[in-house]
Image (cartoon, helix red, strand yellow):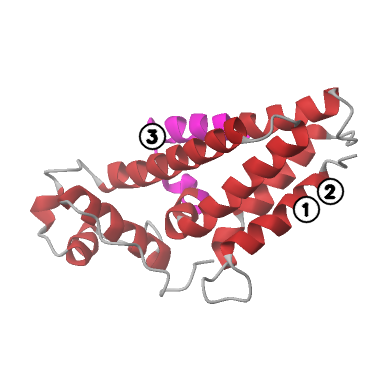
Amino acid sequence: MRVADGAAVPRGSNGRDAILDSAIRLFNQCGYHGTSMRDIAAGAEITVASIYHHFKSKQEILQSIMVRALQAALSLTRTAVVRSDGSPGGQLRAVMRAWVIFHTTHQLDAVVAATELRSLEPPGRELVIALRDEQEALFRDVVARGVEEGVFGTDHPLDATRGIISMGQSICMWWRADGPMTAEQLATRYETLALAIVESA
């Protein structure tokens, strides 16, 4: 499933960013395997040869997109936890809001990160999996602490964590900026849903 063609990615300020932005748009429209280096070059308004000044291969482009997206998500969610009120409920609200905001403000990047892992080869695949595991651990630690302190009642904290992550991640597939809910409104709703999943007291 691909997001709407109208969900634009801003053109980067340098050649590398222009290549990544072009690739992101095309991977969303045609998929990784349906996109050629020639397509990416045309979208970036450069020659194919120019791409190789920045990237060795299409694989390296895909890896760069996924790593950039996951690092951005980690930065947002870590910062949210640090700036929360410190309670398990406050931390879960904060990390869920950041997760939703990421998947609406970095929508096309998030779709590539969510759908193209199957196309990524080693060692890039291992790097991306490690970043995904790090992101899951951030959520898992918040939920585990809430369970330990008795403020989250779920008997299945790992399943609850994965459910929370998945529902936030799926937003990038269907959310539209011109839809009935703003990103902030959606984030507020998903905070409540996350707390319900962990059976917050």
The residue that label 2 is drawn on is: 196
- The quarter of the image holding the N terminus is bottom right
- Callout 3 secondary element: helix
Q: Say what amino acid the circle numbered 1 marks.
A: Leu
Q: In this image, 10 relative to 85: left or right?
A: left
How many residues crowd mark 3 within 10 Å: few (<14), some (14–19), many (20+)? some
Q: Residues within 10 Å of mark 1 (few under 14, many from 20)?
A: some
Residue type at tag 2:
Ala
Q: Which image quarter is the C terminus in?
A: top right
| Front tag of 2 and 3 | 2
Which segment is the magenta one? Answer: 114-136
Checking the image for residue 193, the label placed there is 1
Answer yes or no: is residue 34 visible: no
* Quadrant assignment, res 6: bottom left
Marks 1 and 2 in Cβ contact (< 8 Å): yes
Q: Which residue is mark 3?
A: 124
Q: Is residue 183 left or right of residue 191?
A: left
User: At x 80% / y 45%, what residue is drawn?
Assistant: 195
